Amino acid sequence: MNQISKKKQYLSDLSLFFVAFVWGGGFVAVKDALNTMTPLLLMAYRFILASVIMYIFLHRKIGKLSKSDFKKGSVVGTILFLAFAAQTFGLQYTTASKQGFLTATYVVMVPFLFWVLYKKRPPLKAFIGSMLTIVGIALVSVNSEMIFSKGDALTLLCALLFAMHILSIEYFTKDMNVFKLAFLQLAVAAVLFTVSAVLFEPVVFTLTNREIYAIVYLALFSTFACFTVQTIAQKYTTSSHASILMSLESVFAAVLGILLLNEVLTPLMIIGCVLIFVAIIIIEVNFKKSVE
């Protein structure tokens, strides 16, 4: 690898580290905003603003959109809508730190969904990682009364949907401009969240300064910036390397949840978090290449 390639990979690693940190903070921002806002309305504001910002800055790269583009973007955007809906509703009934780790289990789910769709059996490490994840989820999610909460169940559903989202992006970007897909999925999610909020929640146009800060953070950083940075950064590093760095969002979510929201991690939860994180690394690292 030449000096320029090394520099690009180093910069991409720093960029993905930034993405993980911002996404980790996103759990805290959503949790804080949900104290005074309804979940669908919060996500509607988030995705509308993110879509507008993305189009303003990247309209030249997005270009003209065809019927085929809209169809593909609608599929990915609908999955994204369902994933964030499950995540946001789930966060009403669990902590930001717990949700951060439970959401990261999508990394373990991806190879099994790939197996179902493409009939390609995942390697042994996928089964090992899954077993560790199941144990970790039990330790993180079950409270002192041995109850698996509604929020934990919704978060696991969210992780499954994010796994489906990853596979749908991989499938459609084979013959579609990534910037078009990135914009359309945000726009479709914005429309679905707006319609859902109007139908099922009281629409509020007056927002407090704290709510505005949360929405701007989520739209500008967690959505627009992270989607754009991730797309560019992954051109200069492997998907496995990128996944490991981005999975650090779960660590940042836990740390920021403790520091900013005064959340508490019990010893069992800490062990569970470590097991889930180890499982993610086992799934993503190519040990044969590492040995070589």
Image (tube, helix red, strand yellow):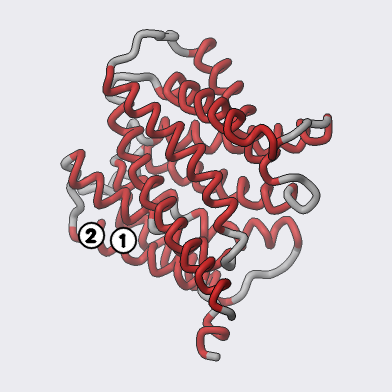
Residue 137 in the image: above or below residue 127:
above
Camera-nearest residue between 116 and 173? 173
The secondary element bearing badge 2 is classed as: helix
Q: Amino acid at mark 2?
A: Leu
Given contact means CB atoms under 8 Å apart, are the residues at marks 2 and 1 in contact?
Answer: yes
Residue 232 in the image: above or below residue 1:
above
Q: Amino acid at mark 1?
A: Gly
Residue 1 in the image: above or below residue 257:
below
Q: Could you say where residue 79 lies in the image, as x and y percent from the top left?
A: 62, 37
Q: As drawn, is 195 to the left or to the right of 275?
A: right
Toward the bottom, the furthest residue is: 292
The secondary element bearing badge 1 is classed as: helix
User: Which residue carries the number 2 mark?
Assistant: 268
Point 50% across, 22% down: residue: 44
Point 68% across, 62% down: residue: 115
Bin the neighbour count of mark 2 within 10 Å (Cα to Cα): few under 14, some 14-19, many 20 and up: some
User: Which residue carries the number 1 mark?
Assistant: 272
**Badge count:** 2
Residue 41 visible somewhere in the drawing: yes
Residue 135 in the image: above or below residue 94:
below
Toward the front, the furthest residue is: 4
Q: Could you say where residue 176 lies in the image, as x and y percent from the top left?
A: 77, 45
Bin the neighbour count of mark 1 within 10 Å (Cα to Cα): few under 14, some 14-19, many 20 and up: many
Camera-nearest residue between 176 and 198? 176
